[in-house]
Amino acid sequence: MKLVHVEKRISNEKVRLVGIVQMDNLGQEIELYFEYPQRFADFVIESADAFVPALLLPAMERGENLEIQPPISEKLWLNLRLIQDIIYQWHPETFKKVQVFAEKPSKYEPHSSNKVGAFFSLGVDSFYTLHKHVNSISPNLPHISHLIHMKGIEFPLSYYRDNQEQEVINRIKDVAEEIGIDVIFGETNIRTHFPLKWGLHYHGAGLASVALSLSGGLKSVLIPSTDSYKTIFHWGSSPLLDHWWSTETTNIFHDGSEVERVEKTAKFLDKDPLARKYLRVCLKNYGSETNCGKCTKCVRTMLPLYVSGKLNLFPTFPDQLPKNWDKILHINDEHDLSHAEAILELAKECDADPQLLTSLSSKIEYARYAIFFEQQNLLAAIKSIIYVFWIKPIIQQIEQLLGQPKIQRLQDKLQRLFKPA
Ligand SMILES: [Zn+2]
């Protein structure tokens, strides 16, 4: 895979950064772009940096070496080996390590701008980052000067129909106006050409490529966190990964991992009038003014609000949980499991309805074993079944008869033999 040319084009009141890429197996060239209103023309530099994160993961997925012919940042280039090491360690089944050839890596002078951008989608993570920086939860936080919202990032461009993004754009404008900061609305086709799994693989690299396409104007760009430091997953955007995409001119920060998503929702955004008015997590009814309240993403966000008695503060959601919420909430992997466990913790802290606590606990317990079985070999799975259905009930009965301390050693031995890791 080869990036052969980059070009900054201005026409029809738009500025477009274009990269021409030759694909090894297609025998043809494709044109990647990042496009913004013309008033941001100075933010867009004719540099190849933005295309490096956009191309590295697709090259690794195909096992193709990557050649970058136009000049790129030396700092970014030097970090590409480390970035590949992290991605390969996390997903060896999907990505291979490849050679990256950059013909002209050069050390840039840091620019004098102190402008800070933050990705913003009206969701929990981006509202928390905005809330934290605008309300100065801790001192010395940089002031956000620009929100960034890109068409073609949340979904590939082919997803959008009938200008459905306009409602979302209008509400982001309202938020920015109320706070008195600017918004950069842009568009990119990187997901059209590279349909990698967004959350798991491409999330951080995709956002980093957008950040670097604005490096002429932004000194720093904040990527709102998905997870907390407590539970760092092998995820496309991560506090272990995002900052390595920085250059001498633009620093990329993963922001907000100091709290869990559940806490962001129920302990911070409940105090933010703009979040209460505009919070949008639902991907099912993109473009609508409200959240559907019936999909797993909605239910996952409504649960912490419901158990803490704050759901009625958020008019973009229905004021009641759907009756079948426990069937709607999906716990398919360790990522989902960690979110569900955090909701359960909060529910216990808030003395939530016992029936809800029981349903959620059972669902989590069931999901834990389902996920465990998926990851284990047959012998380990059989041992786990024996533990759950025979050994654990026997231990509990002996414990009731003799008291816990007397059977501790026996219990430890049985657990070592049978209990799932
Ligand atoms: Zn929904």
Image (tube, rainbow, N blue to C red):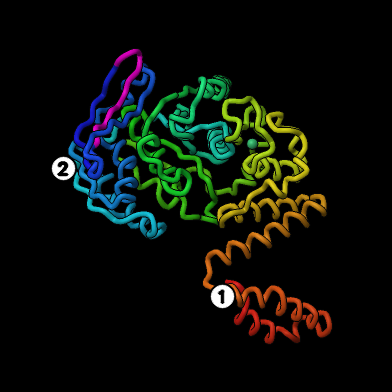
Furthest-left residue in this view: 103
Q: In the image, ligand 1 is in what quadrant?
A: top right
Measured as percent of width and height from the top left, residue 138 is found at: 55, 41
Position of 421 relative to 36 (above/below):
below
| Residue type, label 2 | Glu
Q: Nearer the viewer, residue 58 or 76?
A: 58
Answer with mark 1 or mark 2, whichever residue precedes in sequence: 2
Measured as percent of width and height from the top left, residue 103 is found at: 15, 42
Q: Nearer the viewer, residue 48 or 43?
A: 48
Judge depth for marks 1 and 2 and give the one in front: 1
Residue 362 appears in the rendering: yes
Report if residue 143 lies within the magenta region. no
Name the dominant secondary structure of the magenta segment: strand
Cβ of mark 1 under 8 Å from ligand 1: the answer is no
Tell me which corner region of the image, top left, top right, bottom left or bottom right, holds residue 402: bottom right
Residue underneath mark 2:
103
Measured as percent of width and height from the top left, residue 36 is found at: 38, 22
Residue 220 appears in the rendering: no
How far is mark 1 from mark 2, CA to CA?
51 Å
Quadrant of image for the C terminus: bottom right
Q: What residue range appears in magenta?
A: 11-21
Q: Secondary structure at mark 2?
A: loop
Residue underneath mark 1:
380
Measured as percent of width and height from the top left, residue 396 is found at: 77, 77
Report if residue 13 lies within the magenta region. yes
What residue is drawn where x is 57% and y is 23%?
171
**Dot 2, how many residues are within 10 Å of its Cα: few (below 14), some (14-19), or many (20+)?**
few
